[in-house]
Image (cartoon, rainbow, N blue to C red):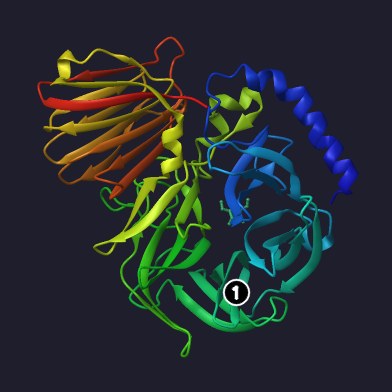
């Protein structure tokens, strides 16, 4: 546990010592969000209030390992340029001794309220408190302490509160593990955000059509979209099934109808949100224009983490770009927010067979590709996109094993929209019907995009910069 001043001083020292290495790092994103130093993971507390987007994030400012987390804090007017503020929540109290874990924000009477998990570890085992704090307009917080403690029937893995309002009441979903080691989403109701009534299990392994579906569900999010109630969550412990569940942990959703009278939720099958190598713990917010916007962590708590080439420069991980969600034919579609178009310059348009397209600088760029199947796009020496009659394969040279690995999407490709930012790539297929997000670390001498194949394709390319 820390005292505030001591913590801030340590953050400033860490920043001053690391600045030089960070600035020199080629892999540092130009326009995606990353932490000023140290390790960033989940987006937290997404909210749009009085014209400002707030993005909090899980942050260890002192090293590139997970450790004891604080909430980093950034604001933006346009989802493109972000300003860093002092960390909002830092682990100061007994009930958060091992970290201010993930959570959400809600605006009540013109004030932003933060919900998060106070993570407490013992020599053997752990417990979790769901806590409430108020964000003052100067960015400081007033902690009100725990409002929900561990319910009976669950292990110490209960966390990541996402709060919303419906009618006169507030509701919260939490990721949980029951004592039989099954992943669940549980939920509560309150009329004042401080006194909460347990409503039971909203969804989970062995409930409502799920068989065994993981030993823990993290980071739930529940929202209403186009007449449906969508539940996002991150199950841990699923077995890989052919092209599905290819990563160590998953992030996905079910679509259904929530009954607030009977406290029950009927929903369809689980679908993955992103088929790339690096995507986890997404969170959404409704902005003041009524858009449902998602930001995810472009990373995973997995075996590659310890080998990230950026660790030697003192930082690790970044967020995805902000994406607008829509519901189409029983599927969530994701499209980059329109504001990102302001980054475009130096447009080039070309129609020819793939082999005849000249190569372009990769650094930070955007491409829209349409055309026949059977072509490849090579990005630097470590990423290859193959478009064929079955669909699309994203190949990446793993930075730990140095062997090629792949992720596949099956279908007919009408349009491929690619966003590149130095060490990240996001592929949006057919207007966001499928998305693949991945990090990659190219050789710095090999940073071009080149095309290959006999297919006729139409390409639009832009440089992206702030
Ligand atoms: C997901 C997660 C959350 C937890 C946070 C800790 O990546 O494990 O469940 O609150 O990260 O940083």
User: Who's the residue at 89% across and 49% down the image?
Assistant: 3
* Residue 354 vertical placement versus 58 (above, below): above
Where's residue 89, x and y in %?
A: 75, 53
- Viewer-proximal residue, 93 or 112? 112
User: Who's the residue at 41% across and 43% down the image?
Assistant: 338
Q: Residue furthest bottom?
A: 261
* Residue 453 vertical placement versus 103 (above, below): above
Instruction: Determine whether the beta carbon of the residue marked 1 sits less than 8 angstroms from the nearest atom of ligand 1.
Output: no
Where's residue 105, x and y in %?
A: 63, 61
- Viewer-proximal residue, 465 or 86? 465
Please tell me in which quadrant of the rendered image residue 50 appears: bottom right
- Viewer-proximal residue, 153 or 110? 110
User: Who's the residue at 54% across and 36% down the image?
Assistant: 305
* Residue 47 vertical placement versus 402 (above, below): below
Answer with left or right where residue 212 lies relative to residue 358.
right
Answer with left or right where residue 332 lies relative to residue 3.
left
Where's residue 114, x and y in %?
A: 69, 62
The residue that label 1 is drawn on is: 154
Q: Is residue 146 visible?
A: yes
User: Who's the residue at 41% across and 35% down the image?
Assistant: 341
* Mark 1 surroundings within 10 Å by alpha-carbon count, few (fewer than 14), some (14 through 19), many (20 or more): some
Q: Secondary structure at mark 1?
A: strand
């Amino acid at each position: 546990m820390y005292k505030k001043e001591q913590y801030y001083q340590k953050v400033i020292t860490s920043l001053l010592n690391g600045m030089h290495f960070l600035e020199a790092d080629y892999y540092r994103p130009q326009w995606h969000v990353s932490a000023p130093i140290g390790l960033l993971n989940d987006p937290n507390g997404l909210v749009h209030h009085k014209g400002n987007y707030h993005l909090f994030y899980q942050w260890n400012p002192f090293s590139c390992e997970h450790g004891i987390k604080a909430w980093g804090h950034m604001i933006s007017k346009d989802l493109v340029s972000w300003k860093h503020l002092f960390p909002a929540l830092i682990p100061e109290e007994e009930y958060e001794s091992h970290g201010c874990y993930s959570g959400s924000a809600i605006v009540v009477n013109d004030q932003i309220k933060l919900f998060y998990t106070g993570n407490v570890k013992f020599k053997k085992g752990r417990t979790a408190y769901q806590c409430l704090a108020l964000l003052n307009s100067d960015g400081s917080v007033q902690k009100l302490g725990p409002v929900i403690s561990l319910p009976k029937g669950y292990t110490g893995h209960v966390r990541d509160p996402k709060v919303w309002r419906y009618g006169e009441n507030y509701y919260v979903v939490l990721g949980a593990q029951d004592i039989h080691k099954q992943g669940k989403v549980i939920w509560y109701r309150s009329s004042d955000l401080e006194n909460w009534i347990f409503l039971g299990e909203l969804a989970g392994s062995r409930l409502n059509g799920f068989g065994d579906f993981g030993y823990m569900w993290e980071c739930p999010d529940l929202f209403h979209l186009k007449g449906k109630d969508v539940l996002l969550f991150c199950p841990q412990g699923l077995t890989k099934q052919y092209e599905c569940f290819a990563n160590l942990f998953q992030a996905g959703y079910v679509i259904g109808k929530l009954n607030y009278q009977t406290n029950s939720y009927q929903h369809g099958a689980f679908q993955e949100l992103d088929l790339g190598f690096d995507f986890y713990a997404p969170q959404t917010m409704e902005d003041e224009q009524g858009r449902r916007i998602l930001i995810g962590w472009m990373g995973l708590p997995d075996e590659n983490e310890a080998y990230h080439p950026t660790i030697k420069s003192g930082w690790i991980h970044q967020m995805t770009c902000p994406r607008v969600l829509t519901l189409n034919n029983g599927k969530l579609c994701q499209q980059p927010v329109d504001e990102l178009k302001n980054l475009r310059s130096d447009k080039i348009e070309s129609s020819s067979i793939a082999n005849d397209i000249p190569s372009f600088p990769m650094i930070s760029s955007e491409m829209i590709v349409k055309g026949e199947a059977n072509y490849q796009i090579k990005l630097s020496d470590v990423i290859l996109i193959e478009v064929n009659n079955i669909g699309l394969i994203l190949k990446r040279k793993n930075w730990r094993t140095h062997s090629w690995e792949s992720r596949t999407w099956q279908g007919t490709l009408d349009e491929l929209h690619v966003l590149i930012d130095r060490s990240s790539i996001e592929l949006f297929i057919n207007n966001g019907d499928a998305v693949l997000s991945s990090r990659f670390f190219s050789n710095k001498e090999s940073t071009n995009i080149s095309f290959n194949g006999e297919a006729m394709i139409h390409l639009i390319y832009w440089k992206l910069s702030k």
